[in-house]
Image: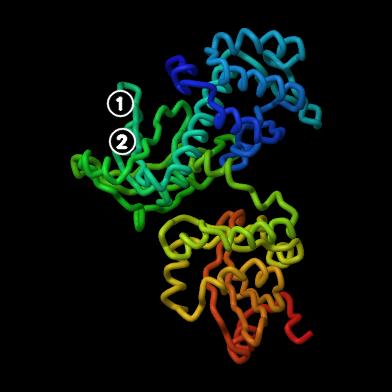
Amino acid sequence: MPEIDVANLFGREPEQVVEYLKQKGYTFSWRWQDTLEAAHARAFTVAKVMRLDILQDIRDSLDRAIREGRTFEQFQRELMPTLKTKGWWGKVMVGDGAGGGEVVQLGSPRRLRTIYDVNLQTANQAGRYKSQWEDRENRPYWMYVAILDGRTRPLHRALNGKVFRCDDPFWDYFYPPNGWKCRCRVRALSAAEVESLGLTVESSAGNLSFKDVLLDAKTGEAIEVAVYKGTDAGGRAFTVSPDAAWSYNPGKAAWQPNLDLYDHQVAVKYLEGGLTGPDYRMFFEQRTAGNFPVAVLDEGFQATIGAKSQTVYLSDQTLAKNLIAHPELSIADYQQLPQIVSMAQLIVQDGDQSLVFVKRDDKIYHAAIKATKSGNGLFLTSFRFTSEADMERVKKRGTVLMDEMGK
C-alpha cells in the first residue's frame, strides 16, 4: 500500500477522526481475532499488547499522527524507541503454562506499519461516515468508490459506482474499509447529483445474505460475513463479500452506544427515549431501513433463554411484515416494547423462538424473540395482541420457562 498522505487525507485537524480514536476504551487481546468488528470499533487494542501503558503509548502516537499529518516514518521514529525500552519489541518465547511455549512476534516495523495503516484508514472512514450521516437530509444517496489501478481487488472494483440510499442495509456491512489495506471510500450525493450523473439508485433488498468464512486456520474458527449479489456495468452477475472480520460499518458501530455494555435499567431508559424520537418515527414510517434496538433483556431473562446479548433488534423487513399482519398495533404500542420485554410475565420456548407475554391495560401483548445462529444477536420476529385462549395453547405446545401471569 502506498504511503498514506495524512495531511491531504484530512485537509485540516480532523476533529471527528481524532474523536473516533479518543472515544474508544481499551481492551487486551492476545490474537487479533479476539476483538473483531463492532467490538474493535469501540475499543482500542493491539494484539499481544497486555499492558495499558503500552496501549496508551501507541494510541497517543496515532492521535499525533492524525493531528499533525505525520507520515508512517515519523510515527515509527517516535514510537519505536519507547516500545523497545518497555520490552515490547522483537520475538520472544511465551510459555503455555504446561511446560511448552511458542515464539511470538511483538513489535516490528511491519507490525507498526499495519497498526498505522489500519487505524488511520478505519478512523478516517468512521469520521466520514459520521459527517455523511449528519448530512443525509441533503445528500441521502451514497456511492461506493474504489481506486481503480493494478492493485484493486476484483470484487471491490465490481462495487465501484454502485449507489444505495444512505439507510440501505448494504452500508451496515460494506461501508469501507472492506479488508486489510482497502482504499475504497464513499461519496455522498444529492438527488440532483444522482440525476445529473445519470446514476441508478439500487436496493439491496433480496440481494443480501450471509455465510461463514474461515477466520483462523489454526483453530478452524469461522466468522459470519455478508454476501451481496449484484450486476456490474456490463450486466454480468457477481457476488461479493468483505474480508473475514471486516463485514461491519466502523463508523456506525463506533458512534452508536453498545447497549450490551449498559446496565439494564440504563439501557431501558435509553431505549424509552430513543423510541419516542424522530429517528424511530422515520424507521416506523418505513422512511429508513436497517435494524433498530427496541428492547433489552435483564440478566434473569438472558439466563432463562441462554442469550449471549441483552439487546433485541427489530429489522425493517420484520417491521414491514408485522405492520401488514397486525395493523391494529400503533407506534405507541411499539414504543412500549422496552417495558413489555422487561416486564415479561410469561416466557415460553417454542422451537427456536422465545415467546413473551405481558398483560397491560386489559390487553395481552405477545412478542417473539429469536437469536441468530451464533447466539450473539437477538431479533424481534413478531409482535401482536393475543388472547387468554391463545396464550394457553402456546403454553401447552411449548416449554414454559417462567410463569408469573397469575400473580
Please report whichever mark, 1 or 2, sits nearer to the chain's N-terminal start.
Answer: 1
- Rendered image: mark on residue 148: 1
Disc 2 marks a residue whose amino acid type is Asn
Instruction: Give the distance between the C-alpha atoms of the residues marked 1 and 2, in whole angstroms.
Output: 9 Å
The x, y position of residue 302, in whole percent, is 71, 62
| Label 2 Cα crowd, 10 Å radius (few <14 / some 14-19 / many 20+) | some
Instruction: Please give the residue where the numbered disc 2 appears in the rendered image.
Output: 160
Farthest residue toward the bottom? 389
The part of the image, by quadrant, that contains residue 171 is top left
Tell me which colouring the rendered structure shows: rainbow
245 to the left or right of 182: right
Residue placed most toward the observer, 226 or 382: 382
> Which of the image's four quarters has the N terminus?
top left
The answer to whether residue 384 is seen in the rendering is: yes
Residue at x 45% of width, y 78% of height: 327
> Which of the image's four quarters has the C terminus?
bottom right
Figure check: 190 above or below 297: above
Badge 1 vs badge 2, beta-carbon distance below 8 Å:
yes
Secondary structure of residue under mark 1: loop
Secondary structure of residue under mark 2: loop
The answer to whether residue 220 is seen in the rendering is: no
Residue at x 47% of width, y 79% of height: 326
123 to the left or right of 47: left
| Label 1 Cα crowd, 10 Å radius (few <14 / some 14-19 / many 20+) | some
The x, y position of residue 70, in whole percent, is 55, 13
